[in-house]
Amino acid sequence: MSKKILILNGSPRPKGNTSMLCEAFIKGAEEQGHTVFKFNLNQMDIKGCLGCIQGHKQCKESPCVQKDDMQKIYPVYQEADIVVLASPMYYWNISGQLKTAFDRLFAVAELNENYQNPVKDCYLIMAAEGNSKDNWEPVLQNYHALLKFLDWKNCGEILAGGVMNVGDIKGHFVLDTAYKAGKAIIG
């Protein structure tokens, strides 16, 4: 059975290292017959969460009171089996683009009693300049805490260190890791 995969790409670089990791992952997943939807968040009009807790008053297809490009993401997110959080590392965290979009997904949780988020499988794809254990530790702590809170399954972390400039990732072994991770998804 084919899986529906949502990739939220928080990189501002359309052809940057994070995007190349996403493309390798997509290639593997599509070769296995899965359907992949990738949103390049930097190219979208997505406003920050208002914290209004009004999502429960909206319809399922358009749960947030704000009407922006999140309207394209909500239906895909609700149907997705797997969510891929893709981002360059910015100050030991995900990019603002990804954080803003992810915060807005709370409107979907507001549709459910007790603000329960839909349960998903999740991957983290990240490119960073640094490549030490200390470099990755804050991001991974945040990611693991998020998944624990959401009750999501961590399917893997695809981390490419030592890649700061656009194209630094060319020939990097992590591209193959991303491809194999996509290819390993079982329907």
Image (cartoon, rainbow, N blue to C red):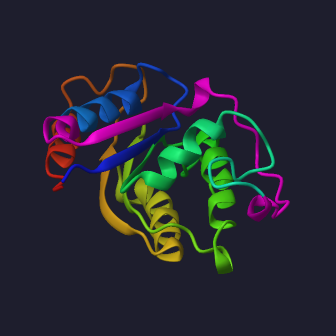
Left or right, residue 89 beside residue 121:
right
Residue lying at 41% horizontally and 56% vertically, measured from the top left:
136
Q: Quadrant of the C terminus?
A: bottom left
> Does residue 66 sit above or below 27 in this rendering?
below
In this orientation, which residue lies closer to the viewer: 11 or 93? 11
Horizontal and vertical percent position of residue 57: 79, 61
Residue lying at 75% horizontally and 59% vertically, measured from the top left:
55
Q: Quadrant of the N terminus?
A: bottom left
**Residue 136 covered by magenta stretch:** no
**Residue 45 covered by magenta stretch:** yes
Farthest residue toward the bottom? 114
Left or right, residue 115 beside residue 55:
left
> Does residue 117 sit above or below 123 in this rendering?
below
Horizontal and vertical percent position of residue 6: 41, 45
Residue lying at 34% horizontally and 19% vertically, measured from the top left:
167
Residue lying at 67% horizontally and 66% vertically, measured from the top left:
111
Left or right, residue 72 beside residue 127:
right
Give, as a single range, the part of the protein colored magenta. Answer: 28-57
Residue 69 image-quadrant placement: top right
In this orientation, which residue lies closer to the viewer: 154 or 94? 154
In this orientation, which residue lies closer to the viewer: 30 or 157? 30
Horizontal and vertical percent position of residue 11: 51, 32
> Does residue 83 sit above or below 53 in this rendering?
above
Question: Number of numbered discs present?
Answer: 0
> Does residue 104 sit above or below 26 in this rendering?
below
Horizontal and vertical percent position of residue 178: 23, 42
